[in-house]
Amino acid sequence: MRLTAIVGDLRKALAEEVRAGERAASRVVRSETDALKGELRSQVTGSLGGKARGIANAWRSQVFPRTGVSLRAAGLVWSKTPLVIDAFERGALIRPKGGGRFLAIATGFNAARGWRGRGDKGLRVTPAQMVASGQGFLRPFRSGRGFVWCLPLRQGAATGRRRRTRLIAGGVAEVGTANRKGREAWARGLLEQGMVPMFLLLPQVKLAKRLDVRGASLRALRRLPRRFAAAWEAEAGRSA
């Protein structure tokens, strides 16, 4: 901050200087808080895909004081899905709870209209329903690390919409699929054999580290002093 000669009432000049600092602090903290929230939301959608938009929007923020201005302004950014965020930031290792041997991970077939979260209730079949149906059977992975939990394919009919096919699996559920990149070849072989893969049974899952919450926070903190000093100069009318 540049030093300037004070002309007039010293108390009034100091009070005006403090008010300029309060406005600058509140404005910069609000801006950086919003920027940090935006960066964290972008990290989620960029790393986890467009279907993770709900997790991205779970990032929230609040600036204090909520009204007025203050030299001690502070911003808070938090997530309403902290366990999910933590898992993808650490690259967590997920294991079954309660002494279970396998995690049951629903496939895209085990979702209303072939999409998780769409339709009336999202997932159509639970592991308990698979067991109760008496029709579920296991297909081991070639690696020996787990199984594909399937239902028999009873009926299939093309709908003509995005190459999507309606499948009746074991009389238990109507599921859907399309020839989407990434699972097409794997799924086609099972479907041709009359199997609809409903769950993947794995002993554990290691998530890839896809988020950098700490790095984003540190970058925002490093920007604050420089931006605050520039904003104070502007608020006090000393901009170059």
Image (spheres, helix red, strand yellow):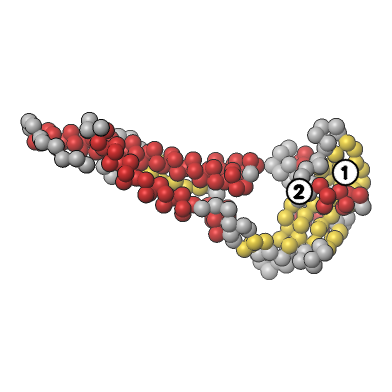
The mark lying in front, picked from 2 and 1, is 2
Residue 173 falls left or right of residue 67? right
Residue 82 falls left or right of residue 51? left
Residue that sits furthest to the left in the current view = 8
Query: Dot 2, how many residues are within 10 Å of its Cα: few (below 14), some (14-19), or many (20+)?
Result: few
Task: Report, in whole angstroms, how far the alpha carbon at label 2 lies from the one at label 1.
Answer: 23 Å
Q: Is residue 40 above or below residue 67?
A: below
Q: Position of residue 165 (x, y in %)?
A: 85, 39
Q: Quadrant of the C terminus?
A: top left
Front-most of 203 and 130?
203
Q: Is residue 170 above or below residue 38?
A: below
Residues at circles 2 and 1 in contact by the CB criterion of under 8 Å: no
Disc marking residue 182: 2
For residue 203, what is the image quadrant?
bottom right
The disc labelled 1 sits on which kind of residue?
A: Ile
Q: Quadrant of the N terminus?
A: top left
For residue 99, what is the image quadrant?
bottom right
- Which residue corresponds to the image point at 12% horizontal and 33% vertical from the top-left? 12
- Which residue corresponds to the image point at 33% horizontal and 36% vertical from the top-left? 27
Q: Position of residue 36 (x, y in %)?
A: 45, 44
